[in-house]
Amino acid sequence: MANFAQMFMRIYDRKIQSGEITFSRSGITAGDFTALCINGSYVIPEERLEIIFEKMSLNEEERQKLREAAEETRRLAEEADS
């Protein structure tokens, strides 16, 4: 399974390339975007993620995939820390 950053970038890249969204309309902050690019265990905080889901017009399948990837990425990060 892809980590959260990988899954997010797949969806984000597809929507950017198709012209569905632009960075400025995606709801993602520059800080979150940078963290996703450099930290494979980074997950956007839940409250901001819900805003991004809306602004990017993600369908239920895309939302579910990202939620599952976020959960798994958080779990793996916690395991690595212990």
Image: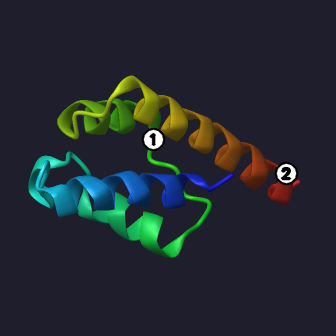
Q: In the rendered view, does 6 fall on the left or right side of 62?
A: right
Colour option used: rainbow
Q: Secondary structure at mark 1?
A: loop
Residue at (42% x, 58% y) in the render: 10
Please tell me whether residue 58 is drawn above or below residue 15 in the rendered image: above
Depth check: 14 or 81 in front?
A: 14
Q: CA distance from mark 2 to mark 1?
A: 19 Å
Label 1: few (<14), some (14–19) or many (≥20) C-alpha neighbours in 10 Å? few
Residue at (43% x, 52% y) in the render: 8
Instruction: Indicate which disc residue 79 carries.
Output: 2
Q: Position of residue 51 (x, y in %)?
A: 27, 33
Q: Position of residue 59 (x, y in %)?
A: 33, 28
Q: Position of residue 24 (x, y in %)?
A: 10, 56
Find disc 1 in the rendering and name its residue: 45
Q: Please tell me in which quadrant of the rendered image residue 41 appears.
A: bottom right
Residue at (49% x, 75% y) in the render: 38
Q: Which residue is the extreme one toward the front?
A: 18
Label 2: few (<14), some (14–19) or many (≥20) C-alpha neighbours in 10 Å? few
Please tell me whether residue 46 is drawn above or below residue 18 in the rendered image: above
Residue at (34% x, 30% y) in the render: 50
Q: In the rendered view, does 25 fall on the left or right side of 5?
A: left
Q: Secondary structure at mark 2?
A: helix
Q: Amino acid at mark 2?
A: Glu
Which numbered disc, 2 or 1, marks the residue that appears first in the sequence?
1
Please tell me whether residue 60 is drawn above or below residue 71 in the rendered image: above
Depth check: 17 or 38 in front?
A: 17
Verify CB contact (< 8 Å) between mark 2 and mark 1.
Answer: no
Q: Amino acid at mark 1?
A: Pro
Q: Position of residue 62 (x, y in %)?
A: 42, 36
- The C terminus lies in which quarter of the figure? bottom right
Report the number of discs.
2
